[in-house]
Image (spheres, rainbow, N blue to C red):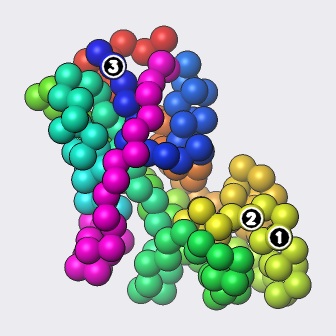
Amino acid sequence: MKLILASTSPYRAAQLRRLGLDFETRDPQVDESLLKATLSSPELLAETLALEKARQVFQQHPDAIVIGGDQLVSFENCILGKPGTEERALEQLISMQGKTHVLITAIAVMAPDFVETHINRTRLKMRPLDKDALKRYVQFDQPLNCAGAYKLESRGITLFEEIQSTDHSAITGIPLIALTSLLVKAGMTLP
């Protein structure tokens, strides 16, 4: 069965390559704005977006196994997504410094007669940093397309004093432990 990643994220694609899987990528072309405006639960929003992305691609490829994913930050009753600009990245990091937030990573796997989701929650405590240090970080890593405005796989690791997760790979975009279990349940043989 063909495997398709319903994402344009280079981070998620790199994670699947790490597993040695042959796959294609497709842009799910999901308008996230309506769901973001109507769903206030971070977990429900991430799961719904992951499902919708998988569904959009699965409709075009009903004989494939499709993986959809979404990631966001839950911080002080707010949902933080990708900042998009250096200014917004700096604002997000300044607000979170010295505090704890939750990185929510959701995946959905769809195949013929199979649909399952998984949500991973990672608790991260940022160390207190001054604005200049955060500005230097944003300029170096350019985390503009990353939920929470950091890349832990790069220099972003220096921003944190504690990380609690059942699957550290979720931080990059896909919880690989859960994904491999879901792929096997969907009928795929892993390398």
Q: Is residue 85 above or below residue 177?
A: below
CA gap, disc 2 to disc 3?
34 Å
| Residue contact between numbered discs 1 and 2, judged by CB atoms under 8 Å | yes
Q: Please tell me how crowded label 3 is: few (under 14), some (14-19), or many (20+) other residues with Cα within 10 Å.
A: few
CA gap, disc 1 to disc 2?
6 Å
Disc 3 designates what residue? 2
Q: Is residue 104 above or below residue 175?
A: below
Whether residue 41 is in magenta: the answer is yes
Residue 181, located in which quarter of the rendered image? Answer: top left
Three-letter residue code for mark 2: Gln
Query: Quick one: 96 or 9, which is closer to the camera?
Result: 9
Q: What kind of element bears circle 2?
A: loop
Disc 2 designates what residue? 142
Residue located at (26% from left, 71% from top): 35
Quick check: can you spot residue 185? no
Residue located at (82% from left, 79% from top): 135
Three-letter residue code for mark 1: Gln
Disc 1 designates what residue? 139
Quick check: can you spot residue 142? yes
Q: Please tell me how crowded label 1 is: few (under 14), some (14-19), or many (20+) other residues with Cα within 10 Å.
A: few
- The spot of residue 175 in percent (x, y) is 47, 43
Q: Earlier in the sequence, mark 3 or mark 1?
A: 3
Residue located at (24% from left, 46% from top): 56
